[in-house]
DNA sequence: ATGCCAAGTTATACTTGA
């Protein structure tokens, strides 16, 4: 494991696992990651690249219904009690289904939820109301988890699709729709009010982004957002020894595979043993 | 140069993303 007895956890919206498989698996090794929560795998379960993870020494749990969404957890420190979705999760689409946006697993004693919060699209779109309902259902489920096992380290990690404050976008004046609305920020704040903590922000300080649009040279121009978050309960947060965003993984080159980047970078958290 | 958007589908345009 990383750093002696510690555990190194990460979350990464990969924007299609199959199109970036070599880059992702190679990164697990070079970054010495014990557990990674993946989002936007964009692969149905029957096409999931299981072998690539197992060959690299990771157990893998995954959930994908089709080419959209999709979440997974890979671990080389144990993987058990896998749960797909959470109680009360709202449905969306036609036909309306519970989308592949959440799965839980316990790795090295940490209860981890890989989350891909709905985008919201625009405030006027039904997807926005769905986003808020989804967050409310998650908060209620998470309150139950932490009440049932207050000493169990629990982390809600993934692409929250919310910039918690104006510090979390490169220019607040250009964000006028979803991701920054008071209702979304209040939905996120409700988790903090419920005892969860953003464990990355205190370590990195503000302005350390995790997402940059593919368009208009957003990455080299540092026009990003901080929307990939690690929220831990007290038992988790008290063990965090370090955290960082691996922005090198947003670069188009630098990997021996030559595969292009996701528009998100991995967020890494290290726990004391 | 990190360099002007990418992935998936059963399409050869469209949806989705944030």
Image (tube, coloured by chain):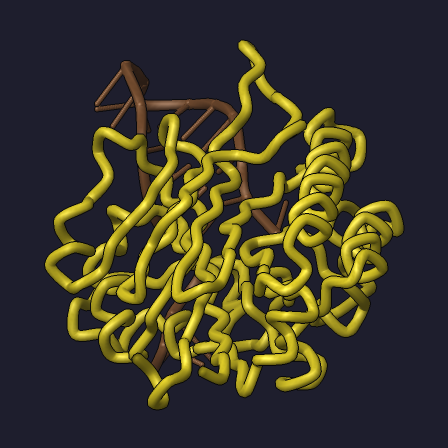
- In the image, is A250 to the left or to the right of A120? left
Q: How many marks?
A: 0
The quarter in which the C terminus of chain A is drawn is bottom left
Where in the figure is residue A186, as x and y percent of width and height? 86, 52
Which lettered chain is shown in brown? B
Where in the figure is residue A110, as x and y percent of width and height? 49, 63
The quarter in which the N terminus of chain A is drawn is bottom left
Q: Residue at x 45, y 77 (%)?
A: A247
Q: Residue at x 17, y 63 (%)?
A: A57
Q: Quadrant of residue A171?
A: bottom right
- Chain A: what color? yellow
Where in the figure is residue A95, as x and y percent of width and height? 54, 10
- In the image, is A22 to the left or to the right of A106? left
Above or below A175: residue A206: below
Question: Which residue appears farthest toward the top when viewing the image?
Answer: A95
Above or below A70: residue A212: below
Q: Residue at x 63, y 64 (%)?
A: A151
- In the image, is A83 to the left or to the right of A56? right
Q: Please name whichever residue, A228 or A143, is drawn nearer the observer in this view of the structure.
A: A143
Above or below A125: residue A173: below
- In the image, is A140 to the left or to the right of A151? right
Q: Is residue A222 visible?
A: yes
Q: Residue at x 28, y 71 (%)?
A: A27
Above or below B10: residue A10: below
Q: Is residue A122 visible?
A: no
Where in the figure is residue A114, as x and y percent of width and height? 50, 51
Q: Please name whichever residue, A156 or A208, is drawn nearer the observer in this view of the structure.
A: A156
């Amino acid at each position: 494991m990383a750093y002696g007895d510690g555990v190194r956890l990460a979350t990464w919206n990969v924007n299609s696992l199959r199109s970036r498989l070599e880059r992702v698996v190679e990164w697990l090794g070079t970054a010495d990651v014990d557990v990674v929560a993946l989002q936007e795998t964009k692969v149905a379960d029957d096409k999931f690249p299981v072998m690539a993870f197992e060959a690299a020494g990771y157990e893998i749990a995954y959930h994908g219904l089709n080419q959209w969404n999709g979440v997974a957890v890979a671990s080389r420190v144990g993987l058990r009690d896998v749960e797909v979705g959470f109680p009360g999760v709202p449905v969306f689409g036609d036909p309306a289904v519970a989308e592949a946006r959440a799965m839980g697993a316990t790795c090295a004693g940490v209860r981890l939820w890989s989350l891909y919060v709905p985008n919201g699209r625009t405030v006027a779109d039904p997807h926005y109301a769905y986003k808020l309902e989804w967050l409310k259902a998650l908060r209620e489920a998470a309150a139950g988890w932490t009440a049932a096992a207050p000493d169990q380290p629990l982390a809600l990690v993934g692409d929250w699709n919310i910039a918690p404050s104006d510090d979390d976008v490169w220019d607040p004046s250009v964000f006028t729709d979803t991701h920054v609305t008071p209702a979304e920020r209040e939905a996120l704040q409700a988790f903090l009010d419920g005892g969860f903590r953003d464990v990355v922000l205190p370590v990195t300080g503000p302005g350390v982004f995790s997402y940059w649009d593919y368009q208009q040279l957003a990455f080299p121009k540092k026009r990003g957002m901080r929307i990939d978050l690690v929220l831990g309960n007290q038992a988790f947060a008290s063990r965090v020894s370090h955290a960082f965003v691996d922005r090198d993984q947003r670069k188009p080159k630098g990997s021996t595979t030559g595969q292009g980047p996701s528009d998100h970078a991995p967020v890494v958290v290290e726990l004391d043993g």
